[in-house]
Image: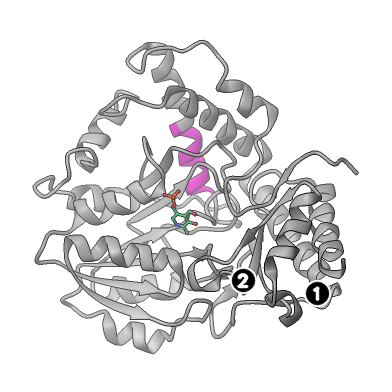
Amino acid sequence: MSDEFLLLNPGPVPLTDDVRGAMDEPLVSHRSTAFEATYERAQRDLDYVFSQSTLDGRTTGNGTSLILNGTATMGMEMAVANLTDADSEIVALVNGKFGRRFKRIAERHARITPVEVAWGESFDLDAVDRAITDDTDLVTMVHNETSTGLLNPVAEVGELASEHDALFVVDGVTSIGGDAFHIDDWHVDVALTDAQKALAAPPGISAIYVTDRAAAAATGESAPFYEDLDWHLRKSEDNQTPFTSAVPLFRALAVAVENIREEGMDTRIRRHRRQSRAFRAGFEAFGLDSFPTVEGPTQLSNTLTAIDLPESVKESPEAFFDAVGERNVSISGGQAHLGGEIFRVSNMGNLTAEQVLRGVRTVGESLTE
Ligand code: PLP
């Protein structure tokens, strides 16, 4: 087995050689036809990723994908800021760091009703049902909560949002491109993802899918200048972004999503599910337990695994993380108050079976050292 550096953090994830190579090509202007061709290819294949992630051969979504010159937090803010104003009511679901980030963004733009449970716990759908009313304009939610490894019930919450005609904005940053995502069935109006996660492209840019309904709801009146959704939509018709594009990153993204199209979303989703099961089974064999609590329609993530550190390791977690690092493998600890409590590994992107096995072996050896 190779001792090459292995990046198993839940983003950024390892790049294939062709994706890395795309960043090395001579630079062109972001207003050139060469760049427009790159944008067009990337957008076409992103449309494929967003719309073919149904795992049953159906196409989903009635809209368009946009590539943004910023990470997914830009897409989260773009959605909220363009679809609400100070008088709007947002219901923000929080059960981890990224749900909390969405809530913080929402607070800056509108009035909010949070539905909050402890990080790693499942939502109480009755509480969500009580929070969403006919006054709700928009609901924010994270599909795959990267901070805890929980796959949240987007279908069920989308149904509730739709009953009250509220717009539904879903962060699919660590699911889209690696797991199933049903824009229509789940009543999603805006979905967003990051380049450096399941798309397996370099960090720095992101993608957002805007349904026709959401595009019509973006009035532009309260839009921030840099994140003006309507402007981005109009420029994308010319295969451009409103401002200077990160050309090498767009090129790398175009190759990454072309690779996804070649693998096929069905095959890719099944591979991700297999690899996450393999991680979990391997860690269980070392006596390790999953961190999140799964109840009702909530599931464990298919793209990353969060493990409760054994009590003996919690006494000095640095020794464990150092031992993993000495084996040339990079994994993540817990975020915020989960620091020193859990570790997280990703199976997003293009991992091989050997890399998964090496991840399991490395964790096991580092625990027992
Ligand atoms: N949402 C989720 C669920 C994430 O995991 C991340 C990154 O880890 C983000 C959003 C966006 O983070 P950033 O803008 O720093 O790339």
State the SS at label 1.
helix
The reply to whether residue 186 is visible in this rendering is: no
Q: Which residues are magenta?
A: 43-52
Residue 193 among magenta residues: no
User: Measuring 59% from the left and 81% from the top, which residue is drawn there?
Assistant: 294
Expressed as whole percent of the image width and height from the top left, the position of residue 50 reads 48, 47
Expressed as whole percent of the image width and height from the top left, the position of residue 91 reads 27, 73
User: Measuring 64% from the left and 42% from the top, which residue is drawn there?
Assistant: 264
Q: Main secondary structure of the magenta part?
A: helix
Which residue appears farthest toward the right when viewing the image? 1
State the SS at label 2.
loop
The disc label shown at residue 284, or none: 1
Q: Earlier in the sequence, mark 2 or mark 1?
A: 1
Expressed as whole percent of the image width and height from the top left, the position of residue 367 reads 81, 68
The disc label shown at residue 14, or none: none
Q: Quadrant of residue 141?
A: bottom left
Q: Nearer the viewer, residue 230 or 223?
A: 223
The reply to whether residue 157 is visible in this rendering is: yes
Q: Quick one: label 1, few (<14), some, or many (20+) residues within 10 Å?
A: some
Expressed as whole percent of the image width and height from the top left, the position of residue 346 reads 65, 56
